[in-house]
Amino acid sequence: KRFGITRRRAELIARDQNNKATATLTRVRQKELGIKQAIWLHSHGGKTPRPSHVKADGSVYDIDKGMYLDGKWTWPGVEINCRCVSRSVIPGLEDLMGK
C-alpha cells in the first residue's frame, strides 16, 4: 500500500533482488577462492522457464564472463525472475570423486 504496488509485484521484486544479491555474493566468493569456472544449474521451477536457461543447464562457464544467453552475457540468478544457480568447478576434485 505504501508504494502503490500490488503484493504480488512486491513479492516478485523482493525475490528478484534477493536472487541478484545471492548470485553476486556467490560470484565474489568464488573469485576470492580462485575458482575460475562454474556449472550453470537450472532450477526447473516456474511456469514458463527460459528455453536458453534450460539449455544451459549443466554447461560450464567462466565466472568472470558469465554465460552468453539470449544475446548477452549473464550469470545464474541475475535475470529477472531467474532462479538458476551455479556449482563451482574445482580442478582435480571430480577426478578424486571418480567422475
Image (spheres, rainbow, N blue to C red):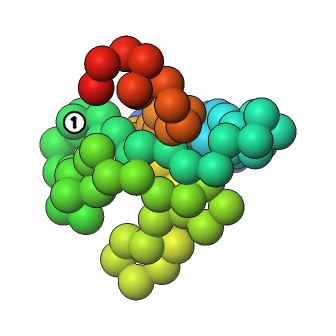
- Left or right? Give the position of 85 relative to 1: left
Asked whether the viewer can see residue 80, the reply is: no
Element under disc 1: loop
Q: How many numbered badges does the structure rendering display?
A: 1
Residue at 30 percent across and 19 percent down: it is: 98
Residue at 35 percent across and 77 percent down: it is: 70
Residue indicated by mark 1: 44
Residue at 77 percent across and 34 percent down: it is: 33
- Left or right? Give the position of 29 relative to 90: right
**Above or below for 27 versus 78:** above
User: Quarter of the image holding residue 16?
Assistant: top right
Q: Which quadrant would the N terminus be assigned to in this image?
A: top right
Residue at 35 percent across and 39 percent down: it is: 41
- Left or right? Give the position of 90 relative to 35: left
Mark 1 nearby-residue class (10 Å; few <14, some 14–19, many ≥20): some
The one nearer the camera, 95 or 6, is 95
The residue lying furthest to the right in this view is 32
Please state the horizontal and vertical placement of residue 22, each as a whole percent of the image.
64, 34
Asked whether the viewer can see residue 70, the reply is: yes
The one nearer the camera, 11 or 95, is 95
Q: Which quadrant would the C terminus be assigned to in this image?
A: top left
Please state the horizontal and vertical placement of residue 43, each as a whole percent of the image.
30, 35
Question: Which amino acid type is shown beneath numbered disc 1?
Answer: His
